[in-house]
Structure formats: C-alpha cells, structure tokens
Image (cartoon, coloured by chain):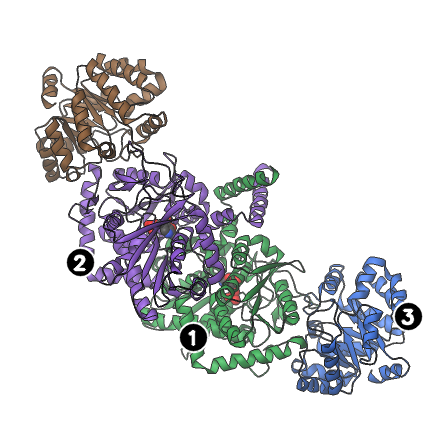
Chain colours: A green, B purple, C brown, D blue
Amino acid sequence: MDANGFYGQWGGAYIPEVLYQTFQDLKAEYSRCRRDPAFWEEYLELMSTYSCRPTPLTYAENLTRHFGGAQIYIKREDLNHTGAHKANNVMGQGLLVKRMGKKRVIAETGAGQHGMATATMAAKFGLDCTIYMGEEDVLRQRPNVFWMEKMGATVVPVKDGSRTLKDAINEAFRDWVTNVDDTHYVFGTACGPAPFPEMVAWFQSIIGIEAAGQIVKYHGKMPAKVYACVGGGSNAMGIFKRFLDDKEDIELVGVEAGGHGADSGAHAIRLSSPDATPGVAQGYKTMFLQDDDGQMNQTHSVAAGLDYVGVSPILTSLWEDKRVRFESATDDEVMQALDLTMKTEGIIPALESAHAFAGAFREVGDLSTDDAIIINQSGRGDKDIFTIAHAFEDPSWEKFIIDRGKEYSKKYSG
Amino acid sequence: MDANGFYGQWGGAYIPEVLYQTFQDLKAEYSRCRRDPAFWEEYLELMSTYSCRPTPLTYAENLTRHFGGAQIYIKREDLNHTGAHKANNVMGQGLLVKRMGKKRVIAETGAGQHGMATATMAAKFGLDCTIYMGEEDVLRQRPNVFWMEKMGATVVPVKDGSRTLKDAINEAFRDWVTNVDDTHYVFGTACGPAPFPEMVAWFQSIIGIEAAGQIVKYHGKMPAKVYACVGGGSNAMGIFKRFLDDKEDIELVGVEAGGHGADSGAHAIRLSSPDATPGVAQGYKTMFLQDDDGQMNQTHSVAAGLDYVGVSPILTSLWEDKRVRFESATDDEVMQALDLTMKTEGIIPALESAHAFAGAFREVGDLSTDDAIIINQSGRGDKDIFTIAHAFEDPSWEKFIIDRGKEYSKKYSG
Amino acid sequence: MEQQLRERLAKKDILLMTHIVLGYPSFDVNREVIEQMVANGVDCIEMQIPFSEPMADGPVILKANQDALANGTRVADCFSFAEEIIRQHNIPFLFMTYYNIIFKYGEEAFFKRAADIGMKGFIIPDLPPEMGETFLALADKYNIAPILIFAPTSTDNRMQELATHGRGFIYCVARRGVTGKKSEFGDDFAEYLERCRASTTLPLAVGFGIQSKEDIDALRGKADMAVIGSRTIKLVESEGAEAVGPFIAGLR
Amino acid sequence: MEQQLRERLAKKDILLMTHIVLGYPSFDVNREVIEQMVANGVDCIEMQIPFSEPMADGPVILKANQDALANGTRVADCFSFAEEIIRQHNIPFLFMTYYNIIFKYGEEAFFKRAADIGMKGFIIPDLPPEMGETFLALADKYNIAPILIFAPTSTDNRMQELATHGRGFIYCVARRGVTGKKSEFGDDFAEYLERCRASTTLPLAVGFGIQSKEDIDALRGKADMAVIGSRTIKLVESEGAEAVGPFIAGLR
Ligand SMILES: Cc1ncc(COP(=O)(O)O)c(C=O)c1O
Ligand SMILES: Cc1ncc(COP(=O)(O)O)c(C=O)c1O
C-alpha cells in the first residue's frame, strides 16, 4: 500500500471531507497498533480465549480418496465464535475502538455474518451498535437479525437501491458522516477506503499464519495451492497473505460467485470474467460490475456473502500482477460441492465457503498425491439452513415451515 | 464402577441376552483403549484437528462485573465441531467402532444434537448411520433432521410412547438387538447399561482436564465452584470428573431442568426434587421420574436435551454421597439467563447450557471476588433458533415464518 | 414347573405357550382369550404386565403395552386378574414383565404375592442373572421359576452359565431382534438349537415370530415348547377373541 | 467562476445556489424548474448527474437519484440537457456528481465535453484532493472550477490545504451528516464559518439543510452563498414545478 492507500492503481480513499480527520486518526491508531507487538499479542490472547484460535487444519481423508489427487486440507474458520472468519476482523477492530475511546460501532452486513460478529463484539466490549442490512437480506436472513437484536444491536433495514450489501454500505457511510465523533465504522471486508483493506487483511492474516505452520506440521511441506472464496476478499486475503510472502511457488486461487453462469449476467464475478470494469465507488477503486455509465449492476449468488459488486483492491492488484488466479463456481456446482463435503467429511461449509471447495474439486484430481492443497472454509453452513434447505427443495423442511407458519397465523388471526 | 457396572447401588447393565456378547466385546475393547495411552493420544489428535480442542475458557468480564461476586469463567464447548460437547463422546466412540470393525452406527437423539454429532462422525468414518428421534422432537427440531439427512444418515421418527428421547432410546435398542453383529449403538450420554456411563464420561472428561489447566493459568488457582446442566449427565460428568479427583474442596453443582417449576409436575428434576424414585429402565438403575407402578412419567423442559426421565448413575451416586450438589432452574429463569448472557458477553448458550448459567447466576454474587467459578457452556444456542425465537415470542420471527410458509404453501397448491 | 411341563411332554410331541398383554384390549377380553387358549390345549400362558418402556418388544406388543397403560391398567389389577385366572385354569401361568415393575413393587413383596396366587414363573427379558442376585435368591425362596433366555448370540459358555440359574425351562429366542417378526428356521437355527440342547437339561421353549402350524412343525423334535406371542394379539385385533380357539386348535 | 460570483456579490448581500437532480422527475420538469429558478434570481445551479451509489446524500436526493436512473437517465442525456440549458441561461452552472461517473466516462473526455458546453465547475463529494491529482490538473487545463468542500470536522491545516486546490468557491457543509436534514446555525456554526473564512480567500457557499428565509438570513454577512438542495426537490414533489419560483422569490 502506498501513502494514499493504493495497491498499484487500485484502492485509495474516496471519502467525503467530513470523514477526513477520522480517517487520519484511524490510520494513525492503526499504524501504532501495527508497530506495537503488544497489540498483536493482545489480539491473539483475545482470539484464543473468546474465539477458538488457532482454528484446526483438518485433513480431509475421504475427499482426498474421492478425487485421487493432492492431499486435501481444510482450514476451519467455521469453528470461530459466531461461525465464520468475520470474527477475526471484528474482534481486532474492537480492540482498536477501545484504544480510540469510541463508544459506538456501526456495520453493514449482507449475509448477516458480519453483522452477527459485530453485534457480538459490541456486546462483549460494551459498545452501542447499529447494523445496516439491505431489506432484501433482512428478509432472507431473519435468524441472524434475531440474534443481532438479542445481543442488543439495532438492525436497520436499508430500503434503497438494490436493498442488498452495497446499499447497506452506503447507508453505513451516511450514519458515519453524521455521527463521526463517537462512532467507528467496522468495515466487514478487505474493501472500502484505505486503511480498511489493509487493516482487515492484517487481522485476517492470522488464518494463513496458522495454516502455514499447520500444513508443514501435518504434511511436511508447504501446499501446492490454496483456495478461498472471494466476496469482498477478506477471508481470501486472510489465508493468502502469509503464502504470498513466501518465497516458494504456491499458487493462490480465488473463487468468485458464478451465480447462474458467467454468461448469464446473473453472477458476481469481478475478476474472472470480462463483465467488470475499473471504477470508483464505496470509497475505493477496483473492478466493479457496472454499466457503461458507471452505474452499479445487480449481482446474483446463492451465497449472500459473495453477492457484491466490488472486490478488494489488494486482490485486484494481485490479479493484475497474475500473482493470484481467479476462477468462479456456479450456484449448481456449489450445491454439489456442499453435498459431497457433508456426506464424505461430516463438515458443512457455508455457501460462501462452498465456492472454494467447488473450485478446488475441479482441479485437485490433476495434482500429484505428494502435494497438498488447503481450502479455506470461511464459515459454517448451518447458519444457512433457510437458504440451503430451500435450495435443495427439501419437502419435509417446506412442510415444517408451512405448519409453523399456520400455527403463528392462528395466533394473529384469533 | 464395580465389575457389574455399579456405582454404589446405581448403574448396572440390564440388557436383553441377545446383547450380552456384544457388551462383553465392547467392555473388552473399551478397557484395552483405557489401558493404551496411544488411544487417548489418537483421540486428542482427532479432536484437535477435526474439532477445535482445546476449547477456550472465556473470562466473562461483564457478567462478573454485573454480579459483583466471584470471577466467572465459561468453558466453551459450544465451539466444538457440530456445536456442543456431544462431539467429544461421539468421536471417541467412533474410534472405538473403527477398532471393533463395525460398519454401522445407530443413535438416539432428543434435541438432535447427539444425532447431528453421530451423523457427522459416521460421515467422517464412512459408516452407515441410523438415528432414532421421537416424532415430537423431529417436529420440533427439523433443522437438525435436515442436516443429519444431508450427511447421509437415515432419521427414523419414533411414534411410540411419549414420542421423545426415552422412546428413541428404546427404539435404538430394538434396532441393536436386531443388527447386533455389525452395528454399534453410540449412546449419547452418561446413562444406559455399563460400560456406557463410564465410557461416555471418560471421553467427556477432556472438558474438565482442559478447564483445570486453563483456570489455573488464568486465575492462578482452582475454582471455588463448577456448574453444569444435567440432562443425561455427560457434559456435567465431563467437566466434574477432573475436579472430583482433585484434593481441593471444589464444589460441583449440577443444574436440572425445572420446567414450569418443581411443584408443577412439568419438569425433569430427578435429583433435586422429591419427585423421582429409584428404578431400572433403559438398561440401568437410577432415579427415575415414574409413577408408583414404575411407569415412566412425562417430563417437560424448554430444553429438549434436558427433557429426560433418568440421569447418569454416576451422578446419582455422587448425589447420594453429597459430593455433587443438585439444583434446578425453571424455563423462565433460563430465558432470563440466556438474555443476559447474550447482551453482556455476546455469547449464545444452548437452552440446555443456559440452565448452568441460571444456576450459577443465583449464587455467584455471594462469593468472594478472589474466587472463580466455571460454567460449562455445553453447546451453542443458535441451533435453537426455532425454540428460542418462539419462546421470546419475537413478532418479526413469527411474521418471517408465516411468510415463508405461505410461499411454500403456494408451491404445493398451485 | 419343569415337572409340570415334563408330564405334559410325555403326552405330546410339542407343547404350546401363548402370550397375552394384561389389560389389552381389556381384562374382559383377556379372560375370554385365555379360556379359548386353555380349552384348545395350550400348555402354558405368559401374562405380560405392561410397562411403559418395553425395550425388547416389537411394534405389536409395544402398542399393546401402551394401550393397556392408557386404559389405566395397574399392577394391582394384574395381580387380581391373575389370581382369578389361576384359580380357574389348571395349567401353569407365568408373569412376563420388565424388571422395573418388580423392583418398584418391592422385589420380595412381588414374589410373595405371586407365590400366594400360584404363579409358576417369571420371564424378565431385561434381567440377566448378573443383575439378578436377589431376584434369583427370592425365586428359590418362593419356588417361582426364573425363566432364563438363550439367544443365538449366546456362546456355549454363556448358555451353560445361564442354565445354572434357570428353572422350569429355557426360553430360546429364535433370532436376533424383538418380538413379532417372522423367524427363519434354517440350518443356522438347527445348529443353534443343538447348542441350546447341549447346554442344559431343562426343556427348551422357542419363541419370537412363530405364526403358523408350519413353524411349529419345523420345531417338532427339536424344541419342547413353541411360544406364540404377537400372532394372537394381532388375531384378536383383527378377528376378535373368538378367533383364538380355532387358531390354536389348527396349530397341532 | 470566482470572478462571476464576485461580480454578483457586488450587487447582493448573499447569493443563492440551487440544486437539481438531472432526469428527476424528468428532464422536462428539470427545464421548467431551472427556468423558474433563474427568473427568480438564483445565482448558480448545481446539476447532479445521478449515480447508483450516492453515499453522501440523504433520503430525498438518494431517492431522486434512483428514480432518475430507473427512468433511464444516461450520462449522455445529462450532457445534452446541460448544453441546452447553459445556452439558454446566463448564470454559472456546475455539475455535481460522484467520481465514478467521471472516471468511467474517461476523465479527460468528461472535462473536454463539459468545457465545450460551457460548464463552470464540478462538485465531487467523494473526491478529496489526494485522490484527484489528474482531476485537478484537468480542471486547470479546461478551466473548470473544482469546488472543494470544507466540513466542521476539517482542521485549520486541512482547510488551508484544501483551499490551495479549490477554485470558484468553497462549499462549506453546515454540519456532520448527509444532505437534507435541517442544520442549526448556533455558536459552533459561527465559529466554524470564521475558521473557514480565515482559511481561504475564495467565496464561501454554505449548504446542507437550508430550507427557509430564516436560514438564509442567519447566513447573511457570514457566508457568500447559500445552497438550497433537498428543499426544492421536495417542493416539486409536493406542489409541482410552478411552486419553485414563488419559493425562491420569498427567500430574499
Ligand atoms: C462465511 C463467509 N465467507 C465468505 C464471505 C465473503 O466475504 P470475504 O470475501 O470478505 O471473505 C462471507 C461474507 O459474509 C461469509 O459470511
Ligand atoms: C447442548 C446440550 N447440553 C446438554 C445436553 C444434555 O445432555 P448431557 O446431560 O448428557 O450433557 C444436551 C443434550 O442434547 C445438549 O444438546
């Protein structure tokens, strides 16, 4: 990152003047934290006592046998408190907020995962908390909303635009410019204005640091390839960062949301399809899915957390430099990968994470059995019951919901 | 345990003759495992790579401040793979099954938690799997059923008796006597015929072994008291065992399901109310909630996993010896404890575990601030969304379910 | 009890034991069914005291247990009814039940009352002899036969050990599983029965899934007594108590 | 641009800048509204090219952006319309938009076209000067004023730095927050405006939440130009374009 927050031509901080000073303060505090080894120690201590870091690296013996290629290892971010890698970022920013003395946090959320994590952190640190969530997502992810509220957060449904993640981000910025003095915006992924991409990637880098030690311990050497799904890019940067720094030639693969297919227009492929073009929005410059005028497009993915128009400027720069390869997986491929992983390993990846599995499954059979790959399981899928049971069109589930609905209807009508 | 599986007068193995030889084999294999340090090593390795052991011991700073008494620490079994302590037992029995060369496992489940864990283990170890679940519980816990099926298990709704946990146990025994040669019955708690209580408690003892090391590290000395909820008794025995062995005077408190109150008849209090009497059922002797003829009673708890007529014979013996104190918490107290824990710590205990919290909250304020207590959080509550949102009568949740139900109804009618 | 059976065995090549669940569908129907059974030459009847957790029973008997309890059947009623029946009929009667019924009643009190009314034996499927030290001692004291069970999974050693504790006869379950489902009487079964025979001098009863004259014919010469369980319960359910007599008569 | 404003300031104690969202509710209404504004003495108009992510705008302008886009408003249409308007009206016009609209069009192409049609300045709320090196150079080259923004959170140093890059005037946002909500013009505000004045020689425009003659009176003598934004959009929504003239007339 250069002084203005750019990675090559990507990134920056395209922010309203009201926020300028806050960003100066944030950058200053962040750089103090990076220079202070005690801060990282405190972070590790928090993550090992409140969440369960280090998270395991699981050898997927049955999947390995199934594909007959490289040894498959799964990095288990699903075992974090709140069920996803999002906790790493949020708890780190929580420590920062404490140092800055702010009393309130806000966050955007798509799938609800980052909102859950932020509400959790706010409860733990005694902060006021408001979560912005696209109205569409509030409807899709009601269980997460319920838990956020139970943890004391206010969840605001955002009714503007496409009523999804990007609109929640805009709305969070609107809150921030209004309440900038006492409020910190806990950005949820490695996007947004600098220093967020760098800072989020830093907190998430704990994933790759652990994984590198673990794979050498279990497999005896570094992996041939590392796979991660790419929404905003935080879990991908989290696991990639340590391997990027490595001299060995480790291939890093980001898997984007192929939705109904790369040619369908209904996807969220920013880097591995020609549909995206350079742009500046939501405070940073990256490849966006936008029309010729620069208006953002609708995107689609079965995984709410990947359904985003932009992508981390750090990843865009690595893509341009060909240091990270990008692929996509369609909704259908993802459901198949999920099914196989549940049945063979007893592990339920989040729909987001299942993209990384699908991307890896396509290639792993071609690799040597001497090699290993790591798949980053960014989260657990049981949070997605409403989406997954729906996508599988499970008749018992549908009947269960119908019956419950009738029961509640009676209450309101009688 | 004596040679016949008794703890004082409690326990034993009241089993049909068809199972006699299988129990001999099981006892022999189990005792080989106990004598073989490599087995425990293998178990630890599995739990640290597939689940996330050691699970953290979390200092609950805000709850401690709230009550102003002893320092509150929470043992985080909720962070296990599949979300509860049940994984400890199931993965241990899985290793045993592998050694015995059996190809199929069966299990009973109430809340669905043990069924989930067993289905998971079966997927991982490549075993056929059938789960017996009371029809009532199938209806209450549909999400768990969905996941079990997705992991390749067959879930059989049990339509006999009270159609809950005890009936599922009977039905699992019926399966076992039929398919005894190739099938192992993965008993889910520290009950049932010997050697199950002993064996399950052994696998679960990992909780207390870790917790003892952790509390000394963080707090500098052993805790004054340790709290656990008591359904069958496996999580309680799991955390108590290490402290029982200790010479120091650590008070161990088991919290049972008070349901609508000790006087209501609608509860599952076996040891801390006069309602239960000695009996023999489901293969073992303990205190049962039964009528004068020895017919088992209906029980009630907001927590499906505590809603059971019997209790571990090991605990009954410890109760008789006054080595463990038993208390109960009502449904209402439990919902309050849950609410407080979510809001102050950002942690969602399972409804079962919330009983331990409620029990501890009642007393912790009276203790010295120099002392510490440990509460065993046996599982995470987000699995209970249907029960918890229901119990809180959350209107947005109800509306969400009504709308979803209507959507699915349309599909079937149109 | 063994003596009574041996006397009957002198006259018949195979004896018949039948089974009823007390209070199901009612004591009145029980009474009628027993009359028909005895009138048609049944040699011995096991009367099951219903229990809420009949772990070793299959769907038919399980449901009968539950319905009997739902009808309000109490252990005291079972004793009164048994007392009346034993007075009226001159064949040996047994109680079949689960151990909790006895345990909860008070083990000695239960034995005493049973002996008082002339009960000849107890079949308790969830009480292996290891768990039944006091039970076996009381059986001796009150001269009530503890009927022990052999299973196809029992080793020779185990059978011999069981035989030392058993009285009256040995109940050989025909196969793995619970009551009710049909059993196959093939080579494995024959070998199993030979092992049973070699392990004990007591008469051998064979039960689990015996449904027809063919099944009984297959046992002739190999076993001493055939046990009909779920089959008559289903018969009463579908055709009424009066169908039991002809059915029993047709089995020989 | 600064020159033009200074000339007007010689004749009036405070200037008025108004705001419209292009294509909302339609270009026809835009045209009518602009006519009324100019006829009633507005000194300067910012025309917002709608953007799908108007991060710094409040609900009223946000909705106007979205509706304009839903109506099919394209950047090319905005240029054509602006060209026509500028030809007809003799006051300075500005484009207000977000940086992506310019970036995507091609920065130089955008400046060139704007200069061709006589556009006087750009207000880009998400482009701080650090991010706008090429933008500022092009502004210079094409003689289009880059209107920079002061906020109450800007330090004195920051204001001075911004002032070195600004041309035409400085847009002082009256408070923290987004467009649309009412601002208070109390002591803090006066102090803030003094700081603004001390940091630059450029004229000061004050915007965000100015709704009435009272608000404007409060600015007289302190600011050089008052900016009316959401207020006229709401007026057109509720009372139609013809209400704009009387409203503007009533502000002085
Ligand atoms: C489980 C999970 N994985 C991945 C993502 C995508 O985010 P990112 O690309 O920042 O890791 C999300 C976002 O919500 C998520 O919940
Ligand atoms: C989370 C949780 N805690 C506790 C229990 C109660 O079981 P036990 O008493 O064996 O720990 C259950 C049972 O399902 C459970 O799911």
Q: Position of residue B99 (x, y in %)?
A: 23, 53
Q: Is residue A398 above or below residue A121?
A: above
Q: Which residue position is annotated with label 1?
A: A42
Q: Secondary structure at mark 3?
A: loop
Tag of residue B35: 2
**Does residue C105 appear left or right of residue B150 in this picture?**
left
Determine which of the numbered discs, if any, sits on residue D40 in the image.
3
Q: Is residue C21 visible?
A: no
Task: Check mark 1 vs ligand 1: CB closer than 8 Å? yes or no.
Answer: no
The circle on residue C116 is none
B96 is higher (above) or lower (below) than D52: above
Letter of the chain that mark 1 sits on in the rendering: A
At label 3, which amino acid type do we have?
Answer: Asn
Say which quadrant the N terminus of chain C sits in: top left
Residue D40 falls in which quadrant of the image?
bottom right
Image location (x, y in percent) of residue A169: 61, 66
The label nearer to you, 3 versus 1, is 1
Q: Are marks 3 and 1 on the same chain?
A: no
